[in-house]
Every structure is written in structure tokens, then in C-alpha cells.
Amino acid sequence: MSPEDKLIPSDQITPMDSELVIISFTAAPYPDQKRVKVNFQLSSFQQPPDATITIFGKEGEELASVDVVNISQSDNEITLHLPISHPGKGECQVELKLYNLDERQAREDEKGEVKLTTKNLSSTRTTFTLQ
């Protein structure tokens, strides 16, 4: 057995073509009703995904959002702050979108050398209630 074989057991290597799965996704307001704790768990991955997490109010309006770049762990917890102008009580939704950014060379008719494209991987929504 070579030293390289001892580094990572073969049953722990994620295949390159494996699909990224959102295993769990929850959101709950803190007692102060001004912040929301968002937890999500992902399946194993080789290429770190990026994510956008968005909170929507009871009328569907965007209240808060965050972009997370190069997620490095399967288990994640993020706190989002609600705006002071938020109307208060009611059911809200949280959306998690996972994606990767891919680079390509710009065509002659495009400005710049490199262009970014988005590859959507997975998305889900959940709800929580503000009291």
C-alpha cells in the first residue's frame, strides 16, 4: 500500500458526477423577532457550491438576503437580520438556492476577457412565523 492510499478511504471520496442534495433546511426567528436563524445541511460535494438565501414577507416582498460563496461544509448556520421597517407578525418564507459559477472566454463581440455563467444546482423553500 502506497502512502497516498492511506490519506482518504475510497468510501469517503465523493464522485465528481454526484448530485448535490439539500438534506435539511430550517428557519426560525430568534426571540427578539428581529433576526432569523437559517440552518441547512448538504450532501457531500467535490466542488464547493455558492448559495443565495432570501427571506420573503407575507406579501411575497423580499425582506433580507445573503449570498454565500464557496460553501466549505455540509452543515451550515446563518443569521439574517430583518429590516426595522418590517411590518411584524405573520408567516414568512425562506428560499435557499444553490449554484456554481462557471467561467468562459468572452466572444469577440463581448467586452472583457471572461464571462460568468450560473449553473443552478438545487433550491428549496420553508416557512416560519413571526409572533
Image: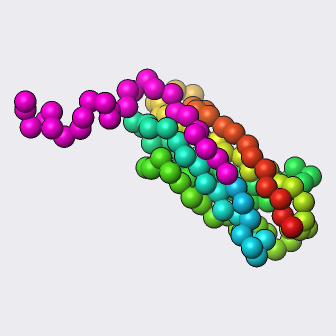
| Residue 117 in view in this figure | no
Asked whether the viewer can see residue 22, the reply is yes
Q: Compared with residue 7, is residue 10 higher up or lower down, i.e. above or below? A: above
Q: Residue at x 90, y 65 (%)?
A: 89
Rendering coords of residue 75 (x, y %): 50, 51
Q: Position of residue 62 (x, y in %)?
A: 81, 54
Q: Where residue 50 sits: x, y (%)?
A: 54, 45
Q: Nearer the viewer, residue 56 or 107?
A: 56
Task: Tell me what residue is drawn at x 74 percent, y 50 percent.
Answer: 94
For image coordinates 90% across by 60% down, the residue present is: 90
Residue 131: which quarter of the image? bottom right
At a point 43% along the width and 23% down the height, the residue shown is 17
Q: Is residue 27 depicted above or below 102 in this figure?
A: below
Q: Quadrant of residue 130?
A: bottom right
In this rendering, position of residue 94 left or right of residue 68: right
Magenta stretch contains residue 5: yes
Estimate the x, y position of residue 107 in percent, counting from the top left: 52, 27
Nearer the observer, 119 or 7:
7
Q: What is the tally of numbered marks visible in this picture?
A: 0
Quarter that holds the N terminus? top left
Specify how the rendered protein is coloured. Answer: rainbow
Compared across the picture, whether 86 is left or right of 115 comes to: right
- Establish if 83 lies above or below 17: below
Give the residues drawn in magenta, as a range: 1-26
Left or right relative to 83: residue 46 = left
Q: Decide whether residue 127 is among the magenta residues.
A: no
Residue placed furthest toward the top: 17
